[in-house]
């Protein structure tokens, strides 16, 4: 069963192709998500019979999350492919994720706060896992923005 995982909340955008939960292909996109994602998926839909779409819906770049959601939801509806979502913290060792200015999203147990980080705080890059078996995807696919009102 072919699954696709899309991580758009950082550069480069990461797209993983999984067969029976195991990573078989990795794609990195350096350009704008809105420009490159349709081109990549045009090829993926020709090459694979995709059974599941997964994406990161929180936290991170609002625009990248919105673009990914609208694009993937459209494919999900038009091709009848289930769409699932999860947190970006699953793919960067739970390290802080860039928010606004010098602030970061920080995961503390089950809460996400926005704050400054210490100078010696480790920031891990996003990585596609070799296996999706331990990742908790959910059916609530709407973007979650995690920022307080201004």
Image (tube, grey):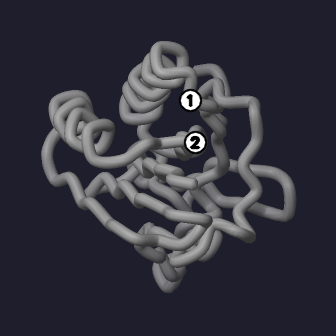
Q: Do the residues labelled 2 and 1 touch (CB within 8 Å)?
A: yes
Q: Where is residue 117 in the image (x, y as percent from the top left)?
A: 55, 67
Numbered mark located on residue 66 in the image: none
Q: Which of 72 and 109 is in front in this view?
A: 72
* Vertical comparison of 87 with 67: above or below: below
Nearer the observer, 38 or 42: 42
- Indicate left or right for 13 with 145 as reference: left
**Residue highlighted by disc 1:** 81
How would you rate the neighbour count of disc 2 (Cα within 10 Å): few for under 14, some for 14-19, many for 20 or more? Answer: some
- Label 1: few (<14), some or many (≥20) within 10 Å? some
Tell me the element at label 1.
loop
What residue does disc 2 label? 52
Give the CA separation, mark 2 to mark 1: 6 Å
Q: Residue at image x 53%, y 70%? A: 92
Residue 122 position, x and y percent, is 51, 82
- Quadrant location, the C terminus: top right
Task: Look at the image and tell me whether residue 57 can be seen.
Answer: yes
Q: Residue at x 48, y 46 (%)?
A: 99
In the image, 5: left or right of 48?
right
């Amino acid at each position: 069963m072919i699954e696709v995982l899309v991580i758009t909340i950082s550069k480069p955008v990461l797209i993983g192709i999984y067969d029976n939960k195991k990573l078989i292909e990795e794609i990195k996109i350096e350009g704008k998500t809105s420009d490159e994602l349709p081109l990549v998926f045009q090829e993926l839909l020709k090459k694979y019979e995709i059974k599941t779409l997964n994406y990161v819906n929180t936290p991170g770049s609002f625009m990248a999350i919105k673009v990914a959601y609208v694009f993937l939801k459209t494919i999900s509806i038009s091709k009848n492919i289930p769409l699932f979502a999860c947190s970006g913290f699953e793919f960067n060792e739970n390290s802080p994720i860039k928010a606004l200015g010098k602030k970061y999203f920080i995961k503390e147990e089950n809460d996400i706060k926005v704050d400054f980080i210490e100078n010696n705080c480790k920031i891990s890059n996003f990585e596609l896992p070799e296996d999706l078996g331990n990742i908790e995807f959910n059916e609530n696919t709407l973007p979650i923005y995690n920022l307080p009102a201004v």
